[in-house]
Amino acid sequence: MKNLNPILFPTGKNLWVALALLLSCVVCPSNGQASPVTDSLLTELSQTIKNNESYIEGKNRQLDQLKNSLKNGNSGSLLHQFTVYDKLVYQYRAFKYDSAFAYALKLQEVARKMNDPVRVTHAKLKLSFILVSSGMYNEALDSLENIRATNLPDSVRLDYYALKSRAYYDLSGYTQDIFYSSRYSKKGEIYADSALALLDESKLQFHAMKGMRAEIAQKPDEARGYFQTILDRFNPTLNQYAMAANSLGNIYYKKGNVDKAIEMMAKAAIADMKGSVKEGVALMTLAEFLYKTGDEVRAYEYIKQALRDATFYGAKQRTIQVAAILPIIEGERLSTVEGQRQRLYIYAIVVTVLSLLVLVFAYIIFRQLKQLREAKRTLTEAFDKLQQTNDELVEAKQTLTDAYDKLRETNEKLIEANVIKEEYIGYSFNFQSTYLDKIDKFKKSIDRKLMAKKYDEIGHAMKSINVQNERELLFQSFDQTFLKLFPNFVSTFNSYFKEEDRIRLKDKNSLNIELRIFALLRLGITDHEQVAQFLDYSVRTIYNYKTKVKNRSILPNDDFEEKIMEIKAF
């Protein structure tokens, strides 16, 4: 078993490779891919087909209004009857053959009663048009042969030549015989030229006739220009739009531009559906195009609707044309469905085999997962213990860090206090020594004067002692010593005030009364009586100075002294 082909007997990773290969073999083939624009139009067409009944209802309402007008009003007037019958023939001509034919006969009957040759000819042309539309070419040509166009108005002659041209052109395409088709085509050209002689380029019908003539003459580029002009320059009705788009679709298809052909034919079919045109060929031709591109689903949907429309219209020729294509598309669709059924059968077998393999591997995997869960549980317990130990170490480390930070802070304060103490002890010894020297010299001077009994000079000597000068020397010495310990005290102190409220000193080596009060505070002398005694002010004065300074500060009053204590020495 170890030497078996891993594709035929897959194991492990090869199982999923084999699964992908097997599934790829049974996937149903995709339909022909259309461009986004074409696909959007086909989706719109399918939705339009679903709304077909609403368009038919709208058409029937129009027809009912015309029929009711025969019963109401001036229904006895031949002119009124002729006008209504003419409109009914126009509405029915592409909608329902038998009704159109019946009203065309009534139109002829009224025209004969009116004894008007022009209206009689007009009625015959209407009947001939319906016969051509239904594929009854011989009958239509027989009817047209009885018309003499020489003395008719230009508008009627135009309709006559245009209809006769179309009859011969349609007959040429229907005959499919080299000998007769060419003869009919030449006759169609002759009548098309006669119709064009009565038209100019400003008329939509001129471009329609020119396009039809060029298309029959195998001049696709010229024909395309005329039909495209109808869509671009004019405002065609739905029926006119459908005929132009239908011709453009056939031209593009013959030139090999299948996507553009399907796009134009879809537009023509949409216009036919919205205009309730049941004798149109756009939907049938579109189904044929889609069938040839491989989109059998839509082709089958559209050909069925084309057959329903042809049956509704009631002309045998249209039904025969659609019925000739339907079996081909339906047969191909049945073949596709049968192929899909066989592939689904193979797919079911493959899925069954793979399901058994999956069950075997599931059992193996389940056993391995059970072992893995046990190993995972053991590892999880070990990890939890390790995590707990790590948490304890982290906590202990944090405790030590906090203790170290407090110790370092205390040490810094002790160093600062020690330096301040040493500096002020030196300052005190120096000041006291100087002061004792002065007292000693003063005592000796007094003693000499007493021994010499110069009592008057003793009074003068006493007056020479200036306590205020001595106090200023004391402050000057204090200021110099403090600023030596706290060189940034003044600048830091000023940073707690607005620019206009900051203290500006004349001598950078001396302090004013406000700075001395907070300098003593920074040295730890917080008792107002001690501060007042040192500065020779009353306690109330000291308190007032402190309050004024705090009120000017940008700091809250309660935080001011705390910020003063944070000013670093050195």
Image: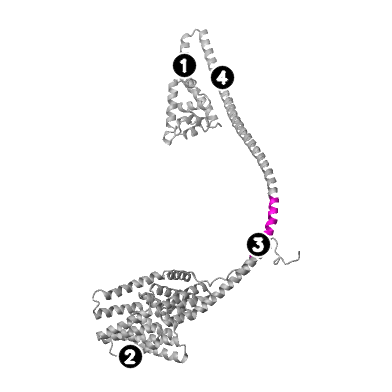
Is disc 3 surrounded by few (<14), some (14 to 19) or many (20+) residues within 10 Å? few
Cα–Cα gap, marks 3 and 4: 109 Å
Classified by dominant secondary structure, the portion drawn in magenta counts as helix
Mark 2, residue position: 146
- Amino acid type, mark 1: Ser
Q: Which of 112 and 246 lies nearest the eye of the viewer?
A: 112
- At horizontal 67% and vertical 59% (from top left) the residue drawn is 359
Dot in front, 2 or 1: 2
Dot in front, 4 or 2: 2
Bounds of the magenta segment: 351-372
Above or below, 179 relative to 562: below
Check disc 3 and report its element: helix, strand or loop. helix
> Which of the marked residues, 2 or 3, is nearer the chain's N terminus?
2
Dot in front, 1 or 4: 4
Quadrant of the drawing holding the C terminus: top right
Residue 464 disc label: 1
| Residue 225 visible in the displayed image | yes
The residue furthest right is 2
Mark 3, residue position: 355
Cα–Cα gap, marks 3 and 1: 122 Å
- Amino acid type, mark 3: Ser
- At horizontal 64% and vertical 34% (from top left) the residue drawn is 400
Mark 4, residue position: 433
- Amino acid type, mark 4: Ser
- Residue 303 position, x and y percent, is 47, 76
Q: Is residue 78 left or right of residue 337?
A: left
Picture quadrant where residue 426 is located: top right
Q: Is residue 237 left or right of residue 402?
A: left
Check disc 1 and report its element: helix, strand or loop. helix
